[in-house]
Amino acid sequence: MKALSYYITLPFIYLVAMLPLGLLYLFSDFLYLIIYRVVGYRKAVVRENLRQSFPAQTQSDLLRIEKKFYRYFCDLVLETLKTLVISPRRLDRMVQFENTELLERYHMEGQSIALVLGHQGNWELVGAAYSQLGFHPLYVIYHPLSNPHYDRLLRHMRTRLGNGLYSVKTVLRDMVSRRDTVTATAFIADQTPQPDRAHWMEFLSQDTPVFRGTAILSRRLKLPLIYVSVTRSERGKYLVKLEELASEPSRLEEDELTELHTRRLEVDIRAHPELWLWTHRRWKHQRTAI
């Protein structure tokens, strides 16, 4: 059954991926009507997340953010499919990087780095564009999919332009095995960890569990921590700003590092709330009583 669903949808996936951007965004406008107006995909989750995250906002303000988010969410899905066939030239026109001197300096020093970002803007498109910068080879930590056919497609999408992958199940072993190679490892650090293994802090006005892995691995492997800020200047145009958070992460405690990159992401979300992934059930866990 898993194979059947994959082979039925695969031609449609590639057909959408090969659309010119103008038609892709027209299709996105249509998809918005279906997903938001007709189906109401995860609308209750989005509304609850927004209400809890911005308690001071009026109902009309929250509704405005909600609509802008769903319009962007449709763009995000289709742009991500586009990475299956996108060319380096097209990527260069869609994604612009600022402060690449930071990458160049560490690359010249032979120093591996850790990149930390959230589900803010199109992280898949940014990862693909990063592969063309010519500095550190990029390895992205990912969760394998339960369907092996879609997992293979996802792996192809993320590696076709030169990036590598670390499974979340073997990330420490994989990173240690490349310790003598100059690399960049990307951590998408705003997913939901198990509550008993998380660092708890206030994030978007709520008590929130945060992964410790980014801080643990950057400290243990002595990897300077660089925040990746992703904003969108217009439809199909992204600006990526690289900011050094900790040049010597071992000088900070794990929880300090965790709060540092989480607070920085929160600034971006509050500035551009429509670009964050509100469909994710980020607050499904509660802090375990001690």
Image (cartoon, rainbow, N blue to C red):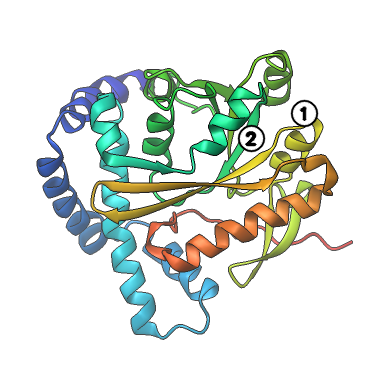
Given residues 66 and 165, the one toward you in this image is 165
The location of residue 56, given as percent across then percent down, is 51, 84
Given the current orientation, which residue lies at the most extreme right position?
290
Dot 2: what SS?
Answer: strand
Mark 2, Cα crowd under 10 Å, few <14 / some 14-19 / many 20+, is: many
Please tell me which residue lies in front, 136 or 14.
136
Can residue 274 be seen from the camera position used here?
A: yes
Give percent across and percent down for residue 151: 44, 23
Side (left or right) of 212 relative to 132: right
Label 1 and label 2: CA atoms lie apart by: 10 Å
Image point (46%, 70%), residue name: 50
Position of residue 37 in the picture relative to residue 53 (left or right): left
- Looking at the rendered structure, the secondary structure element under dot 1 is loop
The circle drawn on residue 114 is 2
Residue pictured at 78% horizontal, 46% vertical: 197
| Vertical side of 151 occupied by 250: above or below | below
Q: Amino acid at mark 1?
A: Leu
Q: Quadrant of residue 219?
A: top right
The N terminus lies in quadrant: top left
Give residue 85's position: percent from left, percent from top.
25, 24
At label 1, counting other C-alpha atoms closer than 10 Å, the crowd grade (few under 14, some 14-19, many 20 or more) is some
Of residue 42 and residue 262, the one placed in the foreground of this image is: 262
Q: Position of residue 35 (x, y in %)?
A: 25, 55
State the residue at coordinates (32%, 37%): 80
Residue for badge 1? 221
Q: Earlier in the sequence, mark 1 or mark 2?
A: 2
